[in-house]
Image (tube, helix red, strand yellow):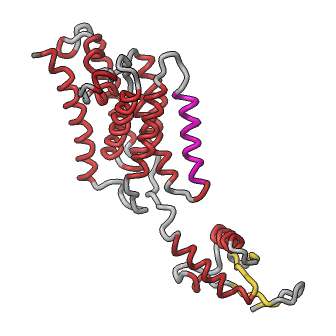
């Protein structure tokens, strides 16, 4: 207990161990400021006192028990928040992720050959695999997947890869290669589905950009989960800004596909369970199965898309 010589009022120090035994004393700057704001919000006067190795929070003696209760309730309510994600280097899984992006380019090159793979002509790939809204609504669900692998020309492909590669690399570093690619594929496919449901029946689209904005949405959602209060809005605002800058310009830009990809990605990012800090981003077996599922889905989709040409 200490006496304030300006007011003559007795003040007491809030001991961290009295709130949560695992909190050391003295307080760090961030936690001290947070506790002070909590007490201010509850109408309890308080002061932060600088110590040799940290901070001490003091309150009027008459408010000491109430202040400790308020801080204890705050800590219990926010225990384990924000969720901690394992620290990953930017280069984790970079080489295999870039290799898969390279495969997208190789596939594009194969579809341009005249005649090309399976003796097909370029226009046949687009006719069978583009996201045709009417066909999707009529049951050709595979088009929401095949359209992600098609591009109108090299400029279309190069711009998508240049914009999307940093997002893909970051997500694969955080969640693992297999899990990351399955989520990327799911966000793009579901984004294409929602876009087809909203567009006119004659609407056609192709390109990986829906999945790339889905990747951005997942990353935004993971950041949302790391924050609390109004700070949660910052990653969402950043995603909306990037959509406006990168996904809304150009005569042939499909804004609907980009928007739905972003929204689906945000939903997926909020639904996936967080990884404990310090753990591997995904168990090897689960990561392999996730990656294999993504590859098999694409193979199945293209098998169904090309089947009419070989009957």
For residue 65, which quarter of the picture? Answer: bottom right
Residue 54 seen in render: yes
Q: Is 139 one of the magenta-colored residues?
A: no
The percent position of residue 139, horizontal first and vertical second, equals: 23, 28
Q: Residue furthest right?
A: 6
Q: Residue furthest top?
A: 114
Q: Is 241 one of the magenta-colored residues?
A: yes
Horizontally, is 271 left or right of 178 in the view? right
Horizontally, is 97 left or right of 89 in the view? left
The percent position of residue 124, horizontal first and vertical second, equals: 25, 12
Is 136 placed above or below 14 here?
Answer: above
Is 147 placed above or below 99 here?
Answer: above
Residue pictured at 44% horizontal, 57% vertical:
86
Q: Residue furthest bottom?
A: 1
The quarter of the picture where the C terminus appears is top left
Q: Main secondary structure of the magenta part?
A: helix
Residue pictured at 25% horizontal, 25% vertical:
138
Which span is picked out in magenta? 231-247
Is 21 placed above or below 126 here?
Answer: below
């Amino acid at each position: 207990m200490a006496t304030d010589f300006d007011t003559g009022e007795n003040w007491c120090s809030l001991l961290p161990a009295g709130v949560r035994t695992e909190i050391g004393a003295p307080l760090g700057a961030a936690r001290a400021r947070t506790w002070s704001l909590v007490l201010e919000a509850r109408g309890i006067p308080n002061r932060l006192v600088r110590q040799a190795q940290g901070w001490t929070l003091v309150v009027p003696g008459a408010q000491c028990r109430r202040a400790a209760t308020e801080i204890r309730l705050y800590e219990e309510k926010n225990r384990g928040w924000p969720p901690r994600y394992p620290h990953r280097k930017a280069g984790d899984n970079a080489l295999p992720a870039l290799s898969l992006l390279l495969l997208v380019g190789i596939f594009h090159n194969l579809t341009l050959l005249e005649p090309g793979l399976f003796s097909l002509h370029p226009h046949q790939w687009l006719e069978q695999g583009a996201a045709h809204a009417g066909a999707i609504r009529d049951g050709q669900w595979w088009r929401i997947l095949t359209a992600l692998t098609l591009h109108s020309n090299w400029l279309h492909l190069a711009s998508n890869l240049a914009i999307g590669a940093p997002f893909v690399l970051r997500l694969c570093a955080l969640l693992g290669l297999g899990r990351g690619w399955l989520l990327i594929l799911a966000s793009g496919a579901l984004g294409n589905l929602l876009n087809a449901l909203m567009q006119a029946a004659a609407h056609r689209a192709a390109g990986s950009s829906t999945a790339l904005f889905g990747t951005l949405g997942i990353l935004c959602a993971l950041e949302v989960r790391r924050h609390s209060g109004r700070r949660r809005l910052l990653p969402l605002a950043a995603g909306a800004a990037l959509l406006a800058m990168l996904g809304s310009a150009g005569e042939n830009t499909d804004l609907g596909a980009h928007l739905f990809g972003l929204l689906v990605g945000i939903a997926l990012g909020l639904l996936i369970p967080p990884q404990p800090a310090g753990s591997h981003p995904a168990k090897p077996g689960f990561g392999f199965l996730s990656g294999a599922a993504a590859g098999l889905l694409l193979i199945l989709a293209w098998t169904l898309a090309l089947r009419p040409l070989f009957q």
